Amino acid sequence: MGKLVYSMHVSADGYVNNIRGGFEWAAPDDEVLESILERMRGVSAYVYGRRYYETMTSWADLRSVPGLKDLDYRFSDVWNETPKYVYSTTLIEAHTSNTTILRDFDPTFLRGLADAGERHVTVEGTTIGAQALRAGIIDGVSIYTVPIATGGGTPFWPVGLPVTLRLIDEHRFASGIVNVRYAPVY
Amino acid sequence: MGRLIYTMITSADGFTTSPDGTFEWAVPTPTIHRHAGALTESLEGEIYGPRMWDTMKAWQDIRPGDGQDYGEVAGAMYEFGETWRSMPHHVFSRQQGKPLTREALRELKAASGGDLGIAGPGLAAVALELGEVDEVARYVVPVTTGGGTPWWPHGLAARLELVDHEVVDAGWLFERYLVVG
């Protein structure tokens, strides 16, 4: 059985974007991106909220763009190949490869995605992340803490939901970004 | 001349208390007690607000033979109490006519031979907004509260530089950041 992992970048004060909705501060450096790419190879599907999906579409089909770094092409290849599920009430159709649009949050479907294979399924986006945490179907949380305080924005953790966690591991990157992995204890 | 270090214990989602103001999830193990004791020992003094003083003043009396049973953490608590009593504490309170000001902070830092700690999210927010906090040292407990008092002031953006990050014990992380501005 694969694990369902809620994963995002987070500021030191706990937000995924700043008060203007910007998250340019969260752009991963090459060392972090290489590490994320390595993890992504072990993922069978990405589950996204609509906003996070739209951010990630910048990785689509980079092979047609000349002059990028080898890492960018490799990241794009993996992203294109991997099945993507996007929760949205407004998207009509997706213009990226292997992409399925889902309308209503269904914990049984999401749990089934992870249970069906050996590899992990990642959940990215705070709305879908909060729904999955509240439903009690998240096995792991992977946070990339960026050395910045935004002073506000969208919180990574759902408001009003206390969760007991077990620390799995942590890894510090040269840039000061730290990956911390927890497992919720239900 | 000392630097000012904001020290605190927070939940993984960044709160110093639960929504109801309690923090029973923040009880340290003996190992964490000793780690925090070493951090406190590295300071020349501490700056508190009235609520933090009310919480911390119990350390005035925690010592062997005080008639209390602290169980397995007793040794670590006695050590911490001794460290705590040996250092000066500066209490600021707007209500008591002694608000924390830039001048007061600069005077304390200038007069100090080493680093000073500041504790309590309300008081630290004042110092952070004045740009007088040089470093933050934070214990992160493996729990989320879903709300409460935020450790970092709302509306204040700052660049940080990670200088230390380690697992202490029982899933508690310790991290230190320089406040770059």
Image: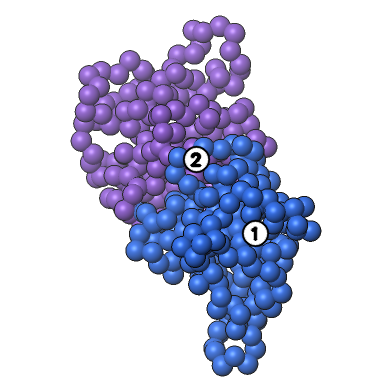
Chain colours: A purple, B blue
Residue visible at 44% across and 69% down?
Answer: B24
Residue A137 numbered tag: none
> Crowding at label 2, few (<14), some or many (≥20) Cα neighbours within 10 Å?
few
**Residue A41 x, y percent position in the rendering:** 50, 32
- Amino acid type of disc 1? Gly
Q: Is residue A150 left or right of residue A4?
A: right
Q: What residue sits 49% from the left and 13% below the top?
A: A62
- Tell me the distance, in whole angstroms, between the alpha carbons under discs 1 and 2: 20 Å
Mark 1 vs 2: CB contact within 8 A: no
Front one among B162 and B72? B162
Residue type of the residue flagged with mark 2:
Leu
Are the residues under marks 1 and 2 on the same chain?
Answer: yes
Provide residue B57's location: percent of width, then percent of height.
56, 75
Q: Chain of mark 1?
A: B
Determine if residue A179 is in view.
no
Location of mark 2 (residue): B156
User: Where is mark 1, residue-wise?
Assistant: B117
> Up-down: is B2 above or below A177?
below
Secondary-structure class at tag 2: loop
Q: Is residue B60 visible?
A: yes
* Residue at (37% x, 54% y) in the render: B147
Upstream in sequence: badge 1 or badge 2: 1
Q: Is residue B44 above or below residue A93?
A: below
Say few, some or many: other residues with alpha carbon within 10 Å of mark 1 (under 14 / 14 to 19 / 20 or more). Answer: many
**In the rendered view of the protein, which quadrant contains the C terminus of chain A?**
bottom left
Above or below: residue A18 compared with residue A68: below
Disc 1 element: strand
User: How many labels sit on residues?
Assistant: 2
Residue in the image at 35% along x and 32% along y: A48
